[in-house]
Image (spheres, rainbow, N blue to C red):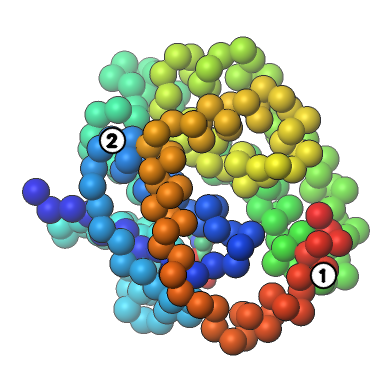
Amino acid sequence: MTRPTITAFDWVPDFAQGQVRDLRVRWALEEVGQPYDVRYLSQGQQKAPPHRACQPFGQVPTYEHGDLTLFESGAIVLHIAESHPGLLPDDPNARARAIEWMFAALNTVEPPIMDHAIATLFEADKPWSRPRLPAIMARIDERLGEVAARLGDREWLDGDAFTAGDLLMAAVLRILRGESALEKHATLADYVARAEDRPAFKRAYGAQMAGFTGNPPPEIAAWLKKNTQAMGEMR
Ligand SMILES: N[C@@H](CCC(=O)N[C@@H](CS)C(=O)NCC(=O)O)C(=O)O
């Protein structure tokens, strides 16, 4: 039986370690018990033609298995969930609802959380980031309140069974790990903690962290040095 190969970075800044999106794919593979190989890219290689042939946007992760090559972590997690038991319920309606939560995580909840990451990290030094922050925080609060209201006192989004919808929702929410924006929604912070306590998550996280054996290219090291203070001030 051949193993799929995914791509991941050999180095990212500290703030991104444990958050790079190959984690979602590793986690899904761990949940279903599918061993995998990793092809590591150094920073910059993701934009070179060989990787662009697999990932048109020049990003990680990708997934290759047999004659199938996929990009987009959500599509990869869905493919893994559809081709192995364990992450999607058998009941067709429950299965559709789990997929609905996958889309909700990526399409409704993640965008304002990524706006926050852009304002406080990637563009922390830009003049437009600070004025934009209150509106971003308000949108995040609204979205997290809505997810918390639907979760209620359930263990997982659709009841007792952890699904690929929970995997992606927890992966998205944990971008705010340790931030008051998440902590103020105590049931969601607990939900993320429950997800992170799963043995499959711990294996995936450990594997991603162990893969950071590379070094930053000089221009990224210089950018980080220049912007660290601005990032600190925006947090
Ligand atoms: N929607 C894509 C986003 C992928 C993405 O943003 N990848 C980041 C790492 S988490 C990346 O490769 N960034 C480097 C770059 O854009 O050059 C997915 O979910 O796969």
Q: Amino acid at mark 2?
A: Val
> Residue 16 placed where, x, y %?
59, 59
Quick one: label 2 or label 1, which is nearer the N terminus? Answer: 2
Residue 32: numbered disc: 2
The relative height of residue 217 versus residue 140 in the rendered view (above or below) is below
- Rate crowding at label 1 as few (under 14), some (14 to 19) or many (20 or more) other CA atoms within 10 Å: few
Q: In what element is the residue under mark 2?
A: helix
Q: Amino acid at mark 1?
A: Gln
**Residue visible at 43% across and 39% down?**
201
> Disc 2 versus disc 1: distance between alpha carbons?
42 Å
The relative height of residue 127 versus residue 182 in the rendered view (above or below) is below
**Residue visible at 84% across and 53% down?**
133
**Residue visible at 81% across and 62% down?**
232
Q: In what element is the residue under mark 1?
A: helix
Per the image, the residue denoted by label 1 is 229
30 relative position to 103: left or right: left
> Residue 72 placed where, x, y %?
42, 55
State whether residue 46 appears in this view. Answer: no
